[in-house]
Image: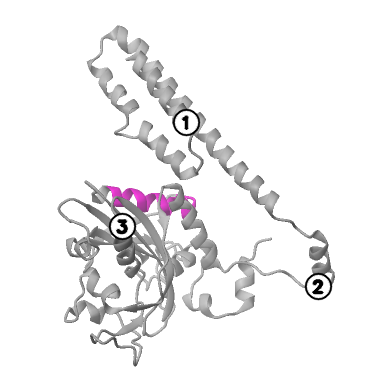
Amino acid sequence: MLQKLDELFKEFQNTLNTINTQADVLNLKSEYLGKKGPISDILKGLKNATVEERKDLGPKANQIKNEIQELTVKKLAFIETEAINQKLASEKIDTSLLNSVMVHGQEHGGFHPITKIQQEIEDIFLSMGFGILDGPHIEDEFHNFEALNVPSDHPARDMQDTFWLQGSETPEGERHLLRTHTSCVQVHGMLANKPPFKFIAPGKVFRCERTDASHESVFHQLEGMLVGKDISVGNLIYFMKTLLSEIFKKEVEVRLRPGFFPFVEPGFELDIRCLICNGKGCSVCKQVGWVELLPCGMVHPNVLKAGNIDPNEWNGFAFGLGLDRLVMMRYGIDDIRHLQSGDVRFVSQFKSY
């Protein structure tokens, strides 16, 4: 067993020296130190070892575990430093231009808060090995509805007030529309990739509905999908809790309740305790203390079939995150309409130098 531990550590070192991305490094670490990894298997086997064997195997396994952790941290830091050095070598900064701008009393622009949160979430999911996909704003009925288990006579179409495009019918009679959710990117992703895979898809969506403090006709979502083998609700909860704790930089109170969405079964609503009023009740949470943030669930077999994936062999989970509401919780914004107002005074509050 001691020899096996040394061999595993040597294999880890050799593989670590051949990879050059942060995602690959984190996946390698998970492969060796995860619950189903070889190091964990050896530690679990200690219960069957003799007292003398435990004296040697236990400390040795923990030592290698700590060394793998240290090597992972060093490799991640090295990759980040290399990326910064390459960027510095390829980009030049004209400092005289900055001085000229400041002399004339002008200030440079900044990112919109939605863009800042989107980039932050993308970095979080990239570190967990997810890819990032994009899709068109104008969709057809197949990608926006039918492939997501919502046929033309399905009552769920009434759940979304759709912007239909006139004169855009195909010869087959199929209409086009402004996408009502980023879930349609799931369909493009399934048709373009073979499982296993995991990706997110941020983007703007459109619905013809009345606006108020927590609803807009144009808003932003971030769709996510993971397809593999033996995926469970536990996997879904793990990724969602990891995301929210990274975004808010603290543990947040959430609740998971049943919810109906045609493209998942079972489906859930993940709510977050309102951070505007701390759960006391306000216009954002409609006086209930909770904000609907993250519809999610296990991918419906019909959706997998529409993506040319065998549901008897593969399964997975999907979720849709409301970026606008997440920004409101993060920065304490009490009206979603500020985000689309175009008011420079509002946006300038989030500018970073």
Q: Amino acid at mark 1?
A: Gln
Question: Going 74% across and 56% down the picture, which residue do you hit?
Answer: 92
Q: Does residue 87 show up magenta in the picture?
A: no
Residue 193 percent location from the top left of the image: 32, 57
Q: Quadrant of residue 108?
A: bottom right
| Marks 2 & 1, CB-CB < 8 Å contact | no
Q: Where, quadrant-wise, is the C terminus in this rendering?
A: bottom right
Q: Nearer the viewer, residue 135 or 290?
A: 135
Boundaries of the magenta span: 235-250
Give the labeled residue for mark 2: 105
Q: Is residue 83 above or below residue 215?
A: above
Q: Secondary structure at mark 1?
A: helix
Q: Earlier in the sequence, mark 2 or mark 3?
A: 2
Question: Going 53% across and 77% down the picture, which residue do you hit?
Answer: 338
Q: Is 47 situated left or right of 340 in this image?
A: left
Residue 244 percent location from the top left of the image: 42, 54
Give the labeled residue for mark 1: 69
